[in-house]
Each structure stands twice: as structure tokens, then as C-alpha cells.
Amino acid sequence: MKKTVITILAVLTYLVLTTCEYDRLTMPDSNDTSKIFNTGEINYIQMNPVWNDFYTPIDIFISLDDYIFVADSGNQRVVVMDKTGNTVMSDNSNNNFADLYHLSIHPVGLCVDSKLNLFITDKSKSIYTWNQFTNNSSNAGEGNDSIAVAIEYRNPDTEELVTITDWQESYALEEEGYIINEVDYTFDQVKIDSILGVHEFYSDDLHPESEYISIAAAPSRENAIYVTDDGEQNIQKINLIRSAYLKLSDGTTVWQHKGVRSKNIATPGTGAGTVNDPKGIFTDPSGSVYYTQTGINFGFHKISKVDEEEELWASMFTLGQNEILELDRFDDPEDVAVDDDGNIFVLNTDANEVQVFDAGGSFIRKAGLRSVQVDTTVQDTIDSQIVERDTIMTKYYNDILDHPRGIFVDNGVIYVVNSGDNSIIRFKLSSDIDVDLDDL
């Protein structure tokens, strides 16, 4: 811990004073594989404290309301935290996360969509869900909720009435301008509790070999999620369709959803945009899908829809043109994240580092490394003469992270699930860190 604080202080001193006052360290042996860069570069610095109290954490996601969800697999729970690192069971807004702390599964992947649906994978053929809104105690109360058994729709222009019990018919009626006129509710506490709690959203009974690893929500307009299937070696699109209509205790009505398999957007192969041992997945607002894999050739892919009508997908990067698609660039990358500027963060797991690329796939820098300042001598050629000069350079070591499994980027902060020591470690650009170190 002291070495980390010393490093942060050193870098900040340089940034503020443009001079270097660092502890001098002995140069490592020549067989050291860490890298040396010029001092003064903008780099990612570890923030303190490290967040602990997990057991085999694997994935992380930050929702639109700034709650951090961690798949704490070994403890069979999803931990909810605020951005100060405090665990949250409930809050002043009546959110209640208690159901997430006692799961019957070992979560390995998770994400939260714009409807506050939490989706969870457990490396099986099933996907589970839980909705934050319906579990808000100001909306849902003990014994006061009900579930629809029939819905009557009315056409405002013709006054025609149509009653349905198949919720899929509601889509066509609403497209034609029909509105809900009356609902026949029943009180079925067992069924309501099963919907409010963590429950199965989708199960691929036709493909029992499926092993869903990571999960990402499509943009809200698409009502879909994407999952990496390590068993069937593909990327699947699962559509959300209406499965129940609830009336909560405060009178609020809300649709609940189940999953229906749509199609494979990427299939087995070894070329760009194909699948070979898929792991992490992420989506951006445009609908592009990013995923990592540990098979041969490419450790990373970005695919986008190139034909909306046929829903055809293709790789957005090309071998030989984009650095991010270089062969054997990554060592078993487990996850990927994209920030608001389109920068891509690949969690290079076996190398214990994060590689950062711009939206065009060009390498920017690495993160997750420990930096120290060293005195060294470099040679310059001036007027055909070799001149030696003393300088201070930054040396980087891959010894902070230990088998990292999950990554998320939010407001310039990189959150890494460090499975090797059961922790969450955060990093921030040195140029973004205030002189006041209290937040580090």
C-alpha cells in the first residue's frame, strides 16, 4: 500500500510542479519483462481504497442510477454498492436489494438495462432476471400487489373493445392506437412473489450444451439482450417479450418480460467477427456489440448490424488495419468495456493488464500497471556525436492485478474485478486526479 501512495504522490508532484522528486530504486535485472516509458506521460493511477469482502468475484456493472452490481460468484450473491464502496441492502429511495444477496446460483455475468432489469448468467443454459423498480418498497408492498388475467383494450376512434389473455397480442393493438381500458386482476401471491424475486428469464431447452457466460443489454429501442455462449460457440440475441402485467401496491402498473431466442449474431469460426471461446461482451448506444474470446487468432471483436431488414452483422475492424485486431495481441482477455467517448478497454487477463484503444481501434495506453520512477542514462546523437545524459523514466510492472475477470468504465474511472485476490480495484488517469488525495 505504501508503494502505491508513494507512486501517486510522485506522479502528482511532477504534474503540478513539473519537477521530479522520487525515491530512487535499483534497476531490475536485464531479464525483467516490464516496460519503460518517458516520464511525464499521462497514465492510469490506482485509486484507494481497494474494495474487498468478495469471494471469487467475476463481473461488474454500473447502472444508470449509479449503483454498482458485482457478481460475487463464490458467495452466491450479487453485491450492490454505491460509488464510495459501501454495500447497499436498501436506500432512502426505498430500493430494496435484499433478494440479490441470497441466490441459489453462482453468478458469473450480469448487466442492467434501461428498464432497471438486472440480468444474470451462471454458466448454464439459463438467464435470470430481477427488476429494481418493481422491488422498490414504495411501489410493491406485502400482499398488496396483483397480476392481470385479462386486459380489455379500447380504440379511441371507433370505441371498439378487444379483450386479450395472450399478452403478445398487445403489441399489434397498441401499434393500431388501442389503449388499455380495463384490467381483470387476480391476487396470486405465489406467482407475484416468483415474478418480484430473482427468477428465470430464459432457458435454452433446445440447446442443452449452452453455457451463457457474459451478458449485455441492447439499446432500449430494441428490447433485447446479447449473451456469449461458450457451449454452443456463438453470440445470441434474446428478445424481451411481455409475460405478465402487474399492479403494484401504489397503483402503478408495469409489464414484466421473458426471453425468446431471436438469432445468433456471430457464429463459430476463426476469422474477424466469428466466435472461438467467447467471454466478455458489451454494447454501445449505436447497437454495436463488442466481445472478447480466448480461442485462436483474435482476442477481440466488434460487430455491427450492416443490414437492418435482414439483420446481418459484420466485423468493424480489419486485420492489418486496426491495432486492436492484431493476431495474438491479447492473452486470454476475459472482458471488455467501452466509455462514453467510444474508447475500448480490453481486460487482458493473463497479462494482468488493461489495454486501451480509441474508437478506431488504435492503441492508446495500458492501465492496471504499477509505475515507479527510475534514474537511468540515455544516449542521444548530436552533431554526429553520441552524448549520454541522465534522466528519470517511468517503469511499469504487471503486479497490481491478479487474474482480473470483469471491467467497467464510468466517468473516467476503470473498475476491475480482481478475482485473484477477491477485490475490486479502480484506476483513473493521472491528468484527471485532483491534487487532493483524499478521494484516492
Image: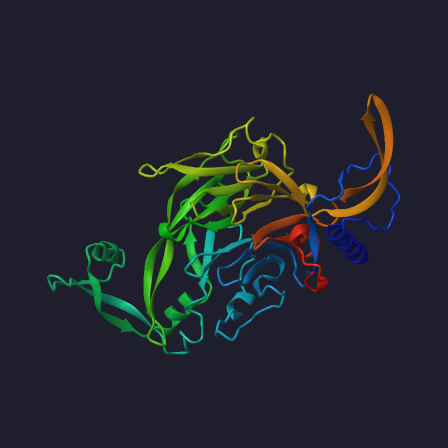
Point out residue 111 in the picture as x, y percentages from the top left corner.
Answer: 50, 55
Observer-nearest of 392 and 312: 392
Q: Is residue 31 left or right of residue 242?
A: right
The quarter of the picture where the N terminus appears is: bottom right
Point out residue 141 in the picture as x, y percentages from the top left corner.
Answer: 41, 77
Q: Quadrant of residue 389?
A: top right
- Which residue is at 26% across, 67% downward? 149
Above or below, 165 relative to 319? below
Report if residue 418 is visible in the image.
no
Observer-nearest of 244 and 68: 68
The quarter of the picture where the C terminus appears is: bottom right
**Outermost top residue:** 384
- Which residue is at 12% across, 64% downward? 159
Point out residue 238 in the picture as x, y percentages from the top left corner.
Answer: 40, 48
Observer-nearest of 189 and 360: 360
- Which residue is at 84% across, 43% downward? 374
